[in-house]
Image (cartoon, coloured by chain):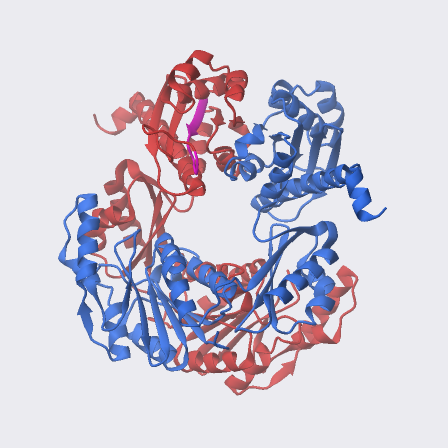
Chain colours: A blue, B red
Amino acid sequence: MKNGAKVDVINLGDELLLGLRDNGHLSYLGEQLSRHGLRIRRNLVIQDDPNEIREHMQSAWSDADLVITTGGLGPTSDDLTREVISEVLGLKLEFVESIRDSLQEWFDRIGRPLTANNLKQCYVPEGAEVLPNPLGTAPGIFLKKDEKILVMLPGPGHELHRMFEERVLPRLEEEDLSASEEQYLQLRSFGIGESALENKLFAVLNKHPEMSVGYCAHQGLVDVRLSLVNGNGSLAGLRETGEQCMEILGEDFVCFGHDSLAEIALSYLRAHDQTLAVAESCTGGLLSNAFTDIPGASQTFTGSVVCYSEEAKIEHLAIPEIILQQHGIVSAETAVAMATGVAEKYSSDYGLSATGFAGPTGGTEENPIGTIFFGLHTPSGAWSHRVTLPGNRFMVKARGVNTAIDWLRRKLTKYQMHDAFSNLEYFLGAGI
Amino acid sequence: MKNGAKVDVINLGDELLLGLRDNGHLSYLGEQLSRHGLRIRRNLVIQDDPNEIREHMQSAWSDADLVITTGGLGPTSDDLTREVISEVLGLKLEFVESIRDSLQEWFDRIGRPLTANNLKQCYVPEGAEVLPNPLGTAPGIFLKKDEKILVMLPGPGHELHRMFEERVLPRLEEEDLSASEEQYLQLRSFGIGESALENKLFAVLNKHPEMSVGYCAHQGLVDVRLSLVNGNGSLAGLRETGEQCMEILGEDFVCFGHDSLAEIALSYLRAHDQTLAVAESCTGGLLSNAFTDIPGASQTFTGSVVCYSEEAKIEHLAIPEIILQQHGIVSAETAVAMATGVAEKYSSDYGLSATGFAGPTGGTEENPIGTIFFGLHTPSGAWSHRVTLPGNRFMVKARGVNTAIDWLRRKLTKYQMHDAFSNLEYFLGAGI
């Protein structure tokens, strides 16, 4: 693999500059490239305007090894991207029959006529490889010239993703520009802040200048991404360093990779043939949703009750009225009664509950806005857990969900440790 | 207001280029600026590296009227942004006592010592205005030089947002660069695709070259944003054009602004003193969550049941077993029974339900993956509605939720029309 390839990404799109949507192409390409040993040097978002494209394409092409563009390949008359870029590269546009055939097929399938507008999409710079687009009409372009590579991708996300993974990554690897094996390792943690985590891992990561380290905090989770860039270091070294970090993190280590907390918790439960039900008030359905986002969840997740009123708690979860009267809706006692109630109602082994104040109104002096009590019912007992979370209603809900599932994960991991310790072979194997 | 101001936004941050997070600063600033009559010409994301900053700051400053930077103002030794930018502008850095005082106060409050590192944050280019940062340690900078303006903002989102709205927008207005009144209008629609919508509105919007038009489709919603840029056009014209578009859209028009479908539906129900309960399977909690995202939802939204198993449907929603046997879990009959069951269970006026196949497994020839039946129970009858939605599990869930609530919205609007027509004053007022 070549060292130190300079990669520039140019996004064309007025809607990005108007703030109509996040630039998901940048985060997608940034992640994909760093997973394969490349790193974006610069990202430029410009209007879909010939002068802008000409100026910035010239500048990128004069200095970068790989230029990736997104957008501007559609059939509308404003899309002059192809023309301007061919001009900058000093190439003619040529008509490609095979593109016309694919377009004809596409339009036949959807039962609409192929218009003259669409035929514009059949022109590509001479010598370019055409990247078929099974999900849309605009084909992509892969072009080698002057020891440089140009990749042009369509704007819609699902078209771009498929084309990049199926067509572009293999070609970049053939050109010895990227690595086939993933050159990165992600550790996911929960329960420790970003800067505290950085301090904890400093002693280990400081020894590895060949690795680029990125941190990303989201709703209580902090991901640490270790990447080998530009062909330095080895995958074995990456793995070893990752394992050292895992040791340091202890219970706060969630997983390697991108699994959600709910995936981790459900896989523990599934492995032990146990089921889970949920009762929630302040999280309002979001806790259930975290579990039902996982394909096949129905084997393990039996269902949930979202109680938004006191009556609902009494009637649907059979919570004794005396508990609500004595301790209030937002209390450890109610949380435990909700967890036990829903586990019984759905005949589940485990019950997980959340009751609290998400804001902007509600809260007491003792339990201000952001306070949530979680309840956990298990075959061997029931517990509660209280937190006060910062932020607005959405942040409290989202972080509350993660905190609940992380708590469940920790409890389950402890059980599993206990199971392991009660296994004689484990003791013998460990030499105890 | 000056016409045609050129605005460049430069984001410093390796984490953006590594794809660790979306560039939320671009979408935030893009929206804020277009709401106040300005438009971003270019956005550049670069590494926090002195050479990169020097090169691109020089280029932006030579050509733009307003340059906004984000990030690179922290206390760590890598943050050389201040130094490099002062150098490019040909200005010295000067130590500002008032920043030191605020920092001292901040560190006293959190009970930690002020370190030498932090004192770096007290240096600003000579002549710059300091923008206080009530939520963090890095102050912002507002600088006028050579008829141009430089704004430097801190990286963390909540610090940036508050500083931009409280300090930067008023200053831009004073400098006659932006407008005080919002120069934009957003129409939200559902049920019509982006390009069909564009065609429908073409005749009206084509008459207004002074307005910039942006479309954004998300999970079945399509937003149309009309903006006056660079001081052209009038707010009255904007309103009038918006109303013409509304007429054309008819039932597909959801609202002006940013309200969610759930907000619209709940506000109808609240106005009529009606309550709503939800029963969902394939949407797994996300439908409930859309309603509970709204502050004060508990007055109207009584609660929900997420049934992930057949037993749960029979037991908790009292659905006759014969219906499930005869029609199956994913059917119009079951959807209606779920809606009626949950409305009765929660003593609610309305019940809304969803049952379907979100994928990746499940589905039948008749009802493939992506098929959802919705049920609606109302005081005057019960209905069902069937859709087949494209995409993966997450897309089907998210779009299914929007489709369900939009269907409820349409039904409610019809009722309200009916109420209105039965109101004599309405007839008199309309001259019928």
Residue A305 versus residue B188: which sits nearer the camera?
A: A305
Horizontal and vertical percent for residue B273? 47, 24
Residue B63 versus residue B428: which sits nearer the camera?
A: B63
Quadrant of the image occupied by residue B338? top left
**Quick check: B268 left or right of A285?**
left
Horizontal and vertical percent for residue A56? 35, 76
Q: In this view, does B38 lie above or below B287?
A: below
Please give the name of the residue rendered at 72% of the width and 71% of the height, measured from the top-left corner: B101
Which quadrant of the rendered structure holds the N terminus of chain B?
Answer: bottom left
Horizontal and vertical percent for residue B160? 55, 62
Count of numbered circles in the view: 0
Horizontal and vertical percent for residue B394? 45, 42
On whether residue B355 falls in the magenta region, the answer is yes
Q: Which span is picked out in magenta?
A: B350-361
Q: Is residue B159 above or below residue B202?
A: below
Please give the name of the residue rendered at 74% of the width and 58% of the height, measured from the top-left corner: A248
**Quick check: B125 left or right of B405?**
right
Quadrant of the image occupied by residue B124? bottom right
Asked whether the viewer can see residue B93, the reply is yes
Residue A261 versus residue B118: which sits nearer the camera?
A: A261
